[in-house]
Image (tube, grey):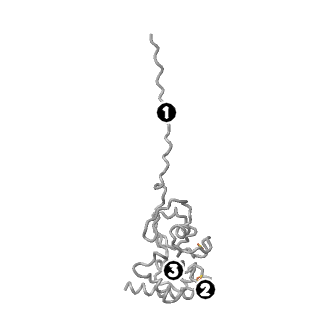
Amino acid sequence: MPETPPPVRRSKAIPVPPVAQSASEKTLPLRINGKTYYHEGDPDMPLLWYLRDVLRLTGTKYGCGIGYCGACTVLIDGKAQRACLTPVKALVDQDVTTIEGLAGAELHPLQQAWIEEDVAQCGYCQAGQILAAADLLRRNPRPSDEDIDKLPNLCRCGTYPRIRKAIQRAAQALAETKK
Ligand code: FES
Ligand code: FES
């Protein structure tokens, strides 16, 4: 009697190593000033570096790098945030506005008021001040001087009295456009 052949042993499926993600799958889409950019580098890169070193949007300034001074303030979905403390990976599906993107066809009322009140001295902190003010007016269209004084942005030139006047002027201008 012929020997029964041994059962065929089927090899277990060998797990296929995951296909390496293509560069395009690794990119982070970032919406900045109404345009979409694709970041392929370190997802922990601070937004401030990305703006200044990659996009060359140098209106956003480096001051302290630790979230204290406000020179790097940008708007993220309309809220004032510190770009030095914000990794780009935190920005998916959010809109970033820098000082370069604040104006529409005309200057933003805050920018106009800043010119009319001749606010800037050295100018270093001013982009951050304007964006912090934009967030304040979004939350509080008619802020008091005390509300303005609570803004956390620092100005080593001491332009605070002119900042106060400019924000009040812009608030007035925005109120008139809504009448
Ligand atoms: S540079 Fe970001 S808060 Fe000072
Ligand atoms: S204008 Fe010089 S730091 Fe504010």
- Looking at the rendering, the quadrant in which ligand 2 lies is bottom right
Rendered residue at 42%/84% (across/down): 174
**3 and 2 marks in contact (CB < 8 Å):** no
Q: How many residues crowd around disc 2 within 10 Å: few (fewer than 14), some, or many (20 or more)? A: few
- Label number found at residue 91: none
3 lies left or right of 156: left
- Residue 35, given in percent of the width and then of the height, sits at 43, 68
- In three-dimensional space, the C-alpha distance between marks 3 and 2, rounded to whole angstroms, equals 15 Å
- Label number found at residue 158: 2
Specify the amino acid type for callout 1.
Lys
Quadrant (top left, top right, bottom left, bottom right) of the N terminus: top left
Specify the amino acid type for callout 3.
Ile
Q: Earlier in the sequence, mark 2 or mark 1?
A: 1
Q: Which of marks 3 and 1 is nearer the N terminus?
A: 1
The secondary element bearing badge 3 is classed as: helix
Q: Which of marks 3 and 2 is nearer the N terminus?
A: 3
**2 and 1 marks in contact (CB < 8 Å):** no
The answer to which of 149 and 92 lies nearer the viewer is: 92
57 is higher (above) or lower (below) than 8: below
Which residue is at the far left? 179
- Label number found at residue 12: 1
The answer to which of 78 and 88 lies nearer the viewer is: 88
105 is higher (above) or lower (below) than 82: below
Rendered residue at 49%/33% (across/down): 12
- Residue 48, given in percent of the width and then of the height, sits at 55, 69
Q: How many residues crowd around disc 3 within 10 Å: few (fewer than 14), some, or many (20 or more)? A: many
- Label number found at residue 130: 3
148 is higher (above) or lower (below) than 22: below
48 lies left or right of 25: right
Disc 2 residue lies near ligand 2 with CB under 8 A: yes
